[in-house]
Amino acid sequence: MRGVFYLTLFAVGFLAQAALAQPVLLQIRPHIGDTLRMHLSQTVEITGTTPGARPDPIRSMTTSIEVFTRAIAHQWTSTGTLMQTITDSVAMNPASAASLAELRRKAMQAKRVWLRVSTDGAMEVVDNDGANRELRRIFGEMPAVLSRNVVSVGDKWMREMQIPLSSEPGATGAVRATFQLDSLGRNGDIAYISMRGTMSRINTPGAAPAGPGYGTTGQLAGTIQIDRRLGWITDSKSSIIVRSTIIANPSRRGETERAPMQVRTKITQWIRAMRAR
């Protein structure tokens, strides 16, 4: 009898492992009518160092933002799911009654934005009237992150994307990232993905071209958790570290050349989501 019991356990374990070993198609495809509650936390730390400079050779600034939103799935289309997002609350730090951050916070709160979310995770703002620039920056610049083909545990895929550089208004960074399906949980319902990549500055229309003494490089890493039954990313953590070197040319003839400034920008982002009960 005991042998039958152990044999049954072995068979169940074998079948479970076989199910998890099957290739899966990872897609963002929420159920129509579902309301998803999302919480975005983002921190930007900028540190500038000028070796040998006196006084105050190191300067730093940290800003953070928290956004609570609801996303309602309205319609499936050939290019993705049409969703309406509602910003319930926004908190910025530092912020004061007269600060620009406070004005931006008030402008974002209670705004409704229509998004089209593709199955590979890319987001696009589809209404031009209701979305202000800050909301468009948060929701409208999510690049595709998922493979369009079926993948098995251990498989990797590469994505190239563009992101804005916080340290340079108007400038853009080219990101080359490698994603990997690390594991599956809950009988294949939860997919765990890791990401690593590099970044370099690219010149875009409207942004000042980088001079000969300017260089920008970066690295990024993160994790993504997809609830395949829900059809949505329920947990996403990422960290981007950008290092820039700025060499200022002497502004006057005979002026001593100043030491290059090293600027380090770290952007940490955490997005959590769950279906509203």
Image (cartoon, rainbow, N blue to C red):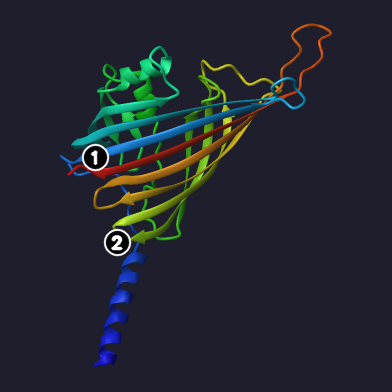
Tag 2: Cα neighbours inside 10 Å, few (<14), some, or many (≥20)?
few
Return the x and y of residue 262 as percentages of the image width and height: 67, 28
Residue in the picture at 26% in, 28% down: 88
Task: Bin the neighbour count of mark 1 within 10 Å (Cα to Cα): few under 14, some 14-19, many 20 and up.
Answer: many
Rendering quarter of residue 89:
top left
Residue that extends furthest to the top in the rendered view of this protein? 252
Q: Which mark is first along the chain, 1 or 2?
A: 1
Q: Quadrant of residue 9?
A: bottom left
Q: Residue at x 40, y 12 (%)?
A: 98
At 42% from the left and 52% from the top, the residue drawn is 193
Q: Position of residue 236 (x, y in %)?
A: 39, 44
Q: Amino acid at mark 2?
A: Arg
Q: Residue at the location (77% across, 25% down)?
A: 52
| Image quadrant assignment for residue 4 | bottom left
- Secondary structure of the residue carrying tag 1 is strand
Viewer-proximal residue among 212 and 227: 227
SS at circle 2: loop
Amino acid type of the residue tagged 1 in the rendering: Leu
In percent of width and height, residue 122 lies at: 36, 37
How far apart are the two marked residues, 2 and 1, measured between alpha carbons?
20 Å
Q: Which residue is mark 1?
A: 36
The mark tally for this picture is 2
The image shows residue 1 at horizontal and vertical percentages of 24, 93
Q: Which residue is mark 2?
A: 186
- Asked if residue 193 lies left or right of residue 249, the reply is left
- On screen, residue 165 versus residue 259, left or right, reads left
